[in-house]
Image: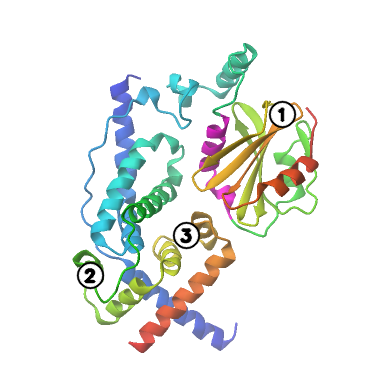
Amino acid sequence: MTGEDDKDFEQYQALDLKIAKALQIDVPELRMPELPSVDTANVSALPARKRSMKPLWFAVAATVVLATSISLRTSGLFQSYDSLPDEILAHLDHEPYALRVTDVAVSDERLARAVPASLAVYDRGDALITYAQPCVINGKDVPHLVIQGEHGPVTILLMPSERVAETTPFDGDSVKGVILPFGKGSIAIIGDREELLEPIQKNVLNSVTWTT
Amino acid sequence: MNSSSAEGKRRQRFDSLVGVFHQDMYRFAAWLSRDKAVAEDVVQEALLRAWKSLDSLRDDAAAKHWLLTIVRRENARYFERRRLETVDIDNLTASQAALLAETPNGELDDLREAIFGLDDDYREPLVLQVLMGYSTNEIAEMMGLKQGAVLTRLHRARHKLKDSVEDA
């Protein structure tokens, strides 16, 4: 670093210090609004339907949830997946750090950990994958990937065990998504409202092979 | 757990989070809206919305980001409802002027006025970075921008402020 760089950096720091002071306005005393009573028996991160009947959801061991889910599904009670988009959106909210904008791609090793060979093979091709994490959605193992789209990060959820009857578009706050039936499972793709998902869908479908 | 006990714990959790982040919520709202009275309204709405959706916050470590995102949305809703366009810095309301009248201090006053006069697109990332401590990645995520766009806006914001301070 040259002396000139040092001077620029010091000026930058000094300006930021002043900006921070200028922004530190006085804050009035907290005035809590009247908070409505919330039916805690019906509170859930995932709105509506069956989950609302399970107030102990957060306390139930994952294995029990999985067993319940499998049991209910095999019983034929859940032919449709109308709440799956809600669960997907809630999952995205839970992992906001996944949606950072970066040009740093995850390593092949990390991708392999997120997409185990026992579930699927994902041919990364020239896609810039910036996040890869093994997750659980609806009690099932779901590789969670993020690529960089034209309008920001795009989430891809590989759901080898989540069968859907048809393509299901959905919307969230500032995002839109689609769940695509794919083989005996499905793939969810979620991006910015402005993002063109169709070309991404095509690439993703060409990149995935289920191995389950 | 019975429902009153559950609600009590829920309220305790909410109070604890709000106690920690209320100042950030207010300051963020104030610099977004450039109006102290509006900021109070926005924070009230944000608190209500946060209370109703508290159970969607699964990790309290993410509470600051969650609450500020709610403030950001409520601020947008507020201005959408009222269709307020721009703030005329030469014709401020009392609560707008109050924001500039904080702790009078020569150079700081000029700088505060310069920040006040920045376009929303420049002021918001600056507040998020300098006051809230967010990285450019996080700001880009929050504002739905590419990181490069955030870096550009921050650079321009500082440049404008530097010019304002030097001219004053």
The residue carrying pointer 2 sits among few (fewer than 14), some (14 to 19) or many (20 or more) residues within 10 Å by Cα, namely: some
Instruction: Please give the range of residues in magenta.
Output: A84-100
Q: Do the residues labelled 3 and 2 touch (CB within 8 Å)?
A: no
The residue carrying pointer 3 sits among few (fewer than 14), some (14 to 19) or many (20 or more) residues within 10 Å by Cα, namely: some
Picture coordinates of residue A176 (x, y %)? 57, 44
Disc 3 target residue: B134
Q: What element carries label 1?
A: strand
Q: Looking at the image, is A93 positioned above or below residue B23?
A: above
Q: Do the residues labelled 1 and 2 touch (CB within 8 Å)?
A: no
Task: Give amino acid for label 1.
Answer: Gly
**Residue appearing at x 49%, y 55% in the figure:** B142
**Residue A27 seen from this side:** no
Q: Earlier in the sequence, mark 3 or mark 2?
A: 2
**Residue nearer the viewer, A82 or A58:** A82
Picture coordinates of residue A40 (x, y %)? 35, 26
Disc 1 target residue: A185
Disc 2 target residue: B97
Both marks 3 and 1 on one chain: no
